[in-house]
Amino acid sequence: MILAGALLVGTAGCTFITPQATLEKYDPGDGVGIDVGDVQVRNAVAVANEDGDAISLILHIVNSGSRSANIDLQYQSDGEKTTVTKPVDAHEVLSFGNTDEDQLVITNPGVEPGALFPVYVQYGDHEGKVMLVPVLEGTGIYEDLTPPASAGR
């Protein structure tokens, strides 16, 4: 009986001191995300065109608050600071970059595939945060999401 108890504790003892991986916050998928107040940005990635002179910013904005919000996305384009404001209604999810109609094309971003592209996200009185968005090649599943080849000219 003592031997069985020692064997049970010996084989299961690691689970008592090992932290559970399911409790750690992470971003599933290829993109990254951040929270700013009641607004969450999810699965943000940038897809570069073949020439490397433009990227398409793909992301989802979730407003879990009870009021609409004007979300400012700020980044470098053509060597200058650029701010794009996107209105998001309360309890709404907006997706950008999934089709030609809603593509956020950034010309001459100064990054290449494999790099991280900084995007500052802010709205209202909430303190903004910088999100480091991975820049991916426009191949495979991202082939249809690339900006036009002449977008950066």
Image: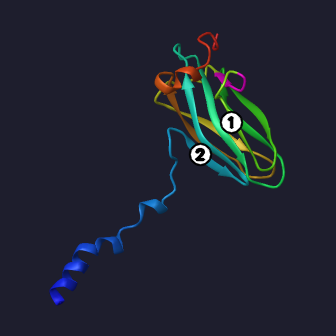
Residue under the point 77% across and 46% down: 123
Instruction: Give the Cα separation between the discs numbered 1 and 2.
Output: 13 Å
Instruction: Where is residue 109? Give x, y as percent.
Output: 60, 24
Q: Nearer the viewer, residue 114 or 110?
A: 114
In the rendering, which numbered label is found on residue 12?
none
**Looking at the picture, which amino acid does disc 1 mark?**
Ser
Q: How many marks?
A: 2
Q: Residue furthest right?
A: 67
Q: Which residue is mark 1?
A: 95
Which amino acid, by three-letter code, is at mark 2?
Gly
Q: What residue does disc 2 label?
A: 33
Left or right of 92? Residue 78 is left
Furthest-bottom residue in this view: 1
92 relative position to 21: left or right = right
Direction from residue 58 to residue 63 in the image, left or right: right
Identify the secondary structure beneath mark 2: strand
Q: Looking at this view, is 139 or 114 the one in front? A: 139
Magenta part of the protein: which range? 101-106
Q: Quadrant of the C terminus?
A: top right
Q: Which quadrant of the figure has residue 42? A: top right
Q: Is residue 128 left or right of residue 31?
A: right
Residue 28 in picture, x, y percent from top left: 50, 46
Residue 111 in picture, x, y percent from top left: 54, 25
* Badge 1 element: strand
Tell me what residue is drawn at x 64 percent, y 29 percent: 98
**Quadrant of image for the N terminus:** bottom left
User: In front: mark 1 or mark 2?
Assistant: 1
The residue lying toward the viewer, choosing from 5 and 97, is 5
Rendered position, 130 above or below 57: below
